[in-house]
Image: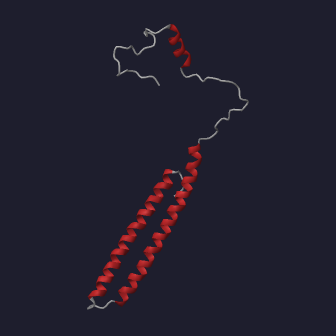
Amino acid sequence: MRRVHDYTSSERPSSPDTSPSSGQGSRKRENSGRKRRVTGTSGAQTMKRTRSIHTQTNAIKASQTAGHHSQRLLTAKTNYYNCRSRLLQELGDISPKDSAMHEKVNASLQELITLGLNYRHVEASQAAVQISHGLPT
């Protein structure tokens, strides 16, 4: 690609038509623009690309990402329900005067809230990936 402006030497013209060089250099520049040189036939056939490499790998990436997100979603769901059952067990065993148990139940409740947020986050990111790759949600 040819520069429009030559910042290193401003007195030199940038156009090849007004160039003070010999006619041979000007002719070489005209012939070399965007043409491919053929050095000789090697006998090998040129293969045409039928499909972009990126479109092939995007489908593979989409399926791998969808599998990864569904695994993360399953793990988040399992963690949520395990914490929920543990919290229900702790609530069944709590007594009004047991402050240590109150702290434990409160911590489990906070964990359950966090796991619920995590589940919704994974679910939303999975839906976003599926929409961006054109897969059914």
Q: Is residue 119 above or below residue 82?
A: above
Q: Is residue 44 above or below residue 109?
A: above
Q: Residue furthest right?
A: 43
Quadrant of residue 6 in the image? top left
Q: Pinpoint residue 10: horizontal percent, then vertical percent.
A: 34, 17
Q: Is residue 53 above or below residue 66?
A: above
Q: Is residue 102 left or right of residue 67?
A: left
Which residue occupies 36% across, 70% down? 114
> In the depicted view, which residue is nearer to us: 117 or 107?
107
Q: Pinpoint residue 96: horizontal percent, then vertical percent.
A: 27, 90
> In the depicted view, which residue is nearer to us: 72 or 126?
72
Q: Pinpoint residue 43: horizontal percent, then vertical percent.
A: 73, 30
Q: Is residue 100 left or right of residue 31?
A: left
Q: Pinpoint residue 111: horizontal percent, then vertical percent.
A: 36, 74
Quadrant of residue 47 in the image? top right
Which residue occupies 51% across, 8% down? 23
Q: Is residue 75 left or right of residue 100?
A: right
Q: Is residue 39 left or right of residue 133?
A: right
Which residue occupies 41% across, 78% down? 83
- Colour scheme shown: secondary structure
Total count of labels: 0
Q: Is residue 27 above or below residue 60?
A: above
Which residue occupies 37% across, 88% down? 92
